[in-house]
């Protein structure tokens, strides 16, 4: 059994179960001292975690190791780094796998990614403000630089 932390549209049970039929929701949590950022993911953008001053909602899934290869297709190694975090619960400490994006350029997500996150947050009754804040920060970067990419003409 492997534990996976998701903080994106894959918090939605239906989406994760398509990839990993063995996925079982283990727990909901809030990641303290984090913020979300949207970064380029091929032709769109996806969220990643950075150190910050918010609490980012997340879920932890239990996944059978036989499904693990499917997760690595969702979070490709050329864009994501795999990490292991220790989570202390009331009963024990869990080793949880988390995927964080490498330093790709800031970008706006396409509408379908925003909708997936909205649905996931609604499904878990999470406060959506950290997603709105991440979208606002992306917009502010674009306004400050005239582009999402500082020191370029793109």
Image (cartoon, rainbow, N blue to C red):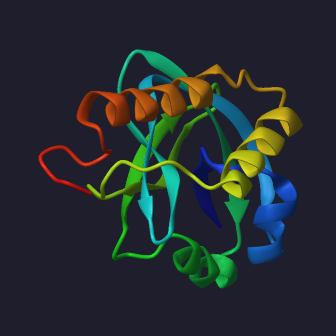
Q: Quadrant of residue 4?
A: bottom right
55 or 119: nearer the viewer: 119
Q: Quadrant of residue 129?
A: top right
Residue 149: give x, y in percent of width and height. 25, 49
Residue 72: give x, y in percent of width and height. 52, 77
In-image side of 86 versus 110 (left or right): left
Residue at x 84% of width, y 55% of height? 13
In-image side of 147 versus 26 (left or right): left
In-image side of 94 versus 22 (left or right): left
20 or 134: nearer the viewer: 134
- Give the position of the C terminus as an image quadrant: bottom left
Residue at x 19% of width, y 54% of height? 153
Q: Residue furthest top?
A: 53
Residue 148: give x, y in percent of width and height. 32, 45
Residue at x 77% of width, y 35% of height? 121
- Can I make out residue 61 in this image? no
Q: Is residue 122 above or below residue 67?
A: above
Q: How many marks?
A: 0
Q: Is residue 151 above or below residue 2?
A: above
- Give the position of the N terminus as an image quadrant: bottom right
6 or 38: nearer the viewer: 38
Q: Is residue 32 above or below residue 76?
A: above
């Amino acid at each position: 059994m492997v534990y996976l932390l998701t903080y994106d549209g894959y918090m939605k049970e239906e989406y994760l179960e398509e990839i990993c039929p063995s996925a079982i929701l283990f727990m909901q949590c809030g990641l303290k001292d984090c913020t979300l950022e949207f970064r380029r993911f091929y032709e769109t953008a996806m969220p990643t975690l950075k150190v910050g001053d918010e609490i980012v909602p997340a879920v932890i899934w239990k996944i059978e190791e036989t499904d693990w290869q499917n997760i690595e297709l969702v979070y490709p190694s050329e864009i994501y780094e795999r990490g292991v975090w220790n989570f202390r619960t009331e009963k024990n400490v869990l080793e949880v796998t988390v995927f964080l994006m490498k330093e790709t350029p800031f970008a706006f997500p396409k509408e379908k990614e925003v909708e997936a996150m909205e649905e996931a947050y609604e499904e878990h009754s999470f406060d959506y403000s950290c997603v709105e804040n991440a979208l606002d920060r992306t917009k502010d970067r674009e306004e400050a630089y005239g582009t999402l990419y500082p020191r370029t003409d793109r």
